[in-house]
Image: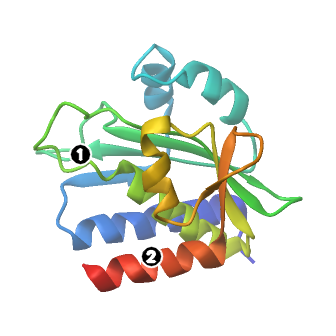
Amino acid sequence: MLSLDEISQAVRNNLQLIIDSQQLKLAVGPISEQDYRILSGGFGELEWDVGLCSYGNNPNRFEFCIKLVKNAVEAVPSGAALCVYGIDDHIFRIHMIESFVRDEDEHPLKGRMVMLTLMAAYLFCMAVDAEGVQICEPVKELLGYYASFGFEMHDSGYAMFADVSTLEVAFEKFFKSV
């Protein structure tokens, strides 16, 4: 049986295969020490310093960073996601997703960060037999997009939830329409 660290690396590798199959010039990896310093320094719109302190040291975390590849992999992240898998309740929680290329229409990550994060969440869930995915404090502008994958707002209004089988059906429909 694989450890959560091994599963995390396998998911990032599979995400890279998906990106490569679409011929996107992007590289996927864990959040490095340099990325941590950049994100904690006020980079982006989300409070990465708080998120990384709250969830970044959790042994059950799953995180990834996406960087543009020109001649080499760029040092500054183009996007990042920070998640935690609940060992006890079998829920994969997405705490932070952010693309840092909102204003760059030609960037290969533009409009793809959430989709890649949901794909990674699904792959992780399949590997650990998770029950569902929760998006914590979803961005209001993306509620409809999340709902298109079967996510529903929790009664608290704080999180959206979709079980793994619902995500699977949504991805099947998505790939049949492409």
- Give the percent coordinates (x, y) of residue 7: 62, 66
Which SS class for mark 1? loop
Q: How many numbered discs? A: 2
Colouring used for the render: rainbow
Mark 1–mark 2 Cα distance, whole angstroms, equals 20 Å
Give the residue type that dot 2 points to. Phe
Image x and y of residue 74, in percent: 24, 37
Q: Which mark is residue 171?
A: 2
Disc sitting over residue 110 in the figure: 1
| In-image side of 65 versus 48 (left or right) | left
User: What quarter of the picture does the C terminus occupy?
Assistant: bottom left
- What residue lies at 75% left-to-right and 46% top-to-bottom? 59
Which residue is at a point 46% across and 13% down the rendered structure image? 41
Res 95 quadrant in image: top right
**Amino acid on which disc 1 is placed:** Lys
Q: Residue at x 45, y 52 (%)?
A: 144
Q: In the rendered image of this protein, does residue 28 appear above or below residue 6?
A: above
